[in-house]
Image (cartoon, coloured by chain):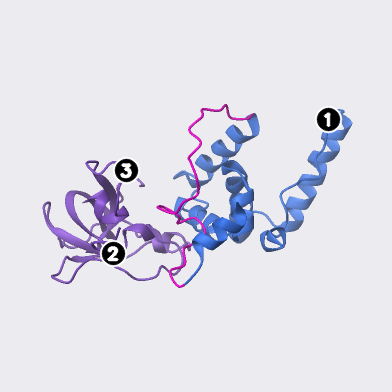
């Protein structure tokens, strides 16, 4: 499927990774589905970050970051995975927190989860999006 | 679409009922005009108002100059060729700097199957 998607997007008439209206990507999944709790949290996080009180960045910046993903990463990630990666990247870009502050906070959260006997996934959000696509 | 802003631009270049063509140029960076509409003709059905430019907001700029945003109606048959629901209307919000008056030259893919 990804090979076909790459082919459909490429050529002299090339498409941006997200701008695929009219290309044959197969049927649209119209099934309703419940959101996981982390997805609700990501949604709330974005609303707070773009709110007039914070204005950490514009929603358009969020779209730009997601649209700049490589094809592999764009196709392999879910809706809210795209959101949380973009939020992370924009917070770094806007110097809301630094990479080392993020690393420290993530390590602390993982330690707390392990201490509580919860499973800690190694499938964390990659620190570098370009590396994640390769 | 974001909420109306404090910004205003000069009088809208187009009026409801005008026939317009979406610019057929590549997008460099964030762009709100989908590729499948570029080069195609449509009719203005509404003027939404003036908004900060998302192409600049996307890079943490103030989004100036403001852009007038229009609702444009397209015929699916013009866009897709053999459209599954040919009687449907297709409406999209397009910013003024992506629109020009529809000329006499044929629109992109006109008559394509």
> Alpha-carbon distance for marks 1 and 3?
50 Å
**Residue tagged 1:** A118
Q: Main secondary structure of the magenta part?
A: loop
Q: Nearer the viewer, residue A102 or B30?
A: B30
Quadrant the C terminus of chain B occupies: bottom left
Q: Chain of mark 3?
A: B
Q: How many marks?
A: 3
Q: Are marks 1 and 3 in contact (CB under 8 Å)?
A: no
Instruction: Provide the letter of the chain coloured blue.
Output: A
Mark closest to the chain's N terminus, 2 or 3: 3
Residue B18 lies in the magenta stretch: no
Which marked residue is nearer to the observer: mark 1 or mark 3? 3
The residue range painted magenta reads A12-36
Q: Are marks 1 and 2 in contact (CB under 8 Å)?
A: no
Instruction: Provide the letter of the chain coloured purple.
Output: B
Along the horizontal axis of the image, is A91 left or right of B69? right
**Residue tagged 2:** B109
Q: Is residue B11 above or below residue B91?
A: below
> Alpha-carbon distance for marks 1 and 2?
56 Å
Would you say residue B6 is visible in this rendering?
Answer: no
Residue A20 lies in the magenta stretch: yes
Residue drawn at x 12%, y 57% as measured from the top left: B18
Q: Which mark is residue B84?
A: 3
Helix, strand or loop for disc 2: loop
């Amino acid at each position: 499927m990804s090979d076909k998607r790459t082919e459909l997007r490429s050529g002299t008439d090339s498409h941006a990774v997200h701008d695929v209206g009219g290309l044959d990507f197969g049927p649209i999944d119209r099934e309703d589905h419940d959101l996981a709790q982390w997805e609700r949290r990501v949604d709330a996080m974005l609303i707070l970050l773009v709110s007039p009180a914070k204005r950490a960045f514009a929603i358009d910046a969020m779209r730009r970051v997601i649209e700049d993903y490589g094809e592999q990463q764009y196709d392999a990630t879910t809706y809210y995975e795209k959101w949380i990666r973009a939020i992370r990247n924009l917070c770094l870009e806007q110097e809301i927190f630094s990479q080392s502050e993020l690393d420290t906070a993530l390590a602390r959260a993982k330690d707390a989860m392990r201490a509580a006997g919860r499973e800690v996934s190694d499938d964390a959000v990659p620190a570098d999006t370009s590396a994640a696509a390769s | 679409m974001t909420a109306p802003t404090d910004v205003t631009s000069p009088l809208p270049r187009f009026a409801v009922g005008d026939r317009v063509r979406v610019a057929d140029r590549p997008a460099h960076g964030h762009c709100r005009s989908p590729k499948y509409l570029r080069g195609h003709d449509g009719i203005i059905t509404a003027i939404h108002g003036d908004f900060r430019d998302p192409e600049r907001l996307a890079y943490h700029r103030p989004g100036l100059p403001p852009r007038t945003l229009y609702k444009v109606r397209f015929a699916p048959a013009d866009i897709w060729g053999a459209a599954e629901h040919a009687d449907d209307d297709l409406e999209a919000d397009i910013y003024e700097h992506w629109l020009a008056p529809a000329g006499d030259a044929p629109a992109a893919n006109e008559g394509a199957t």
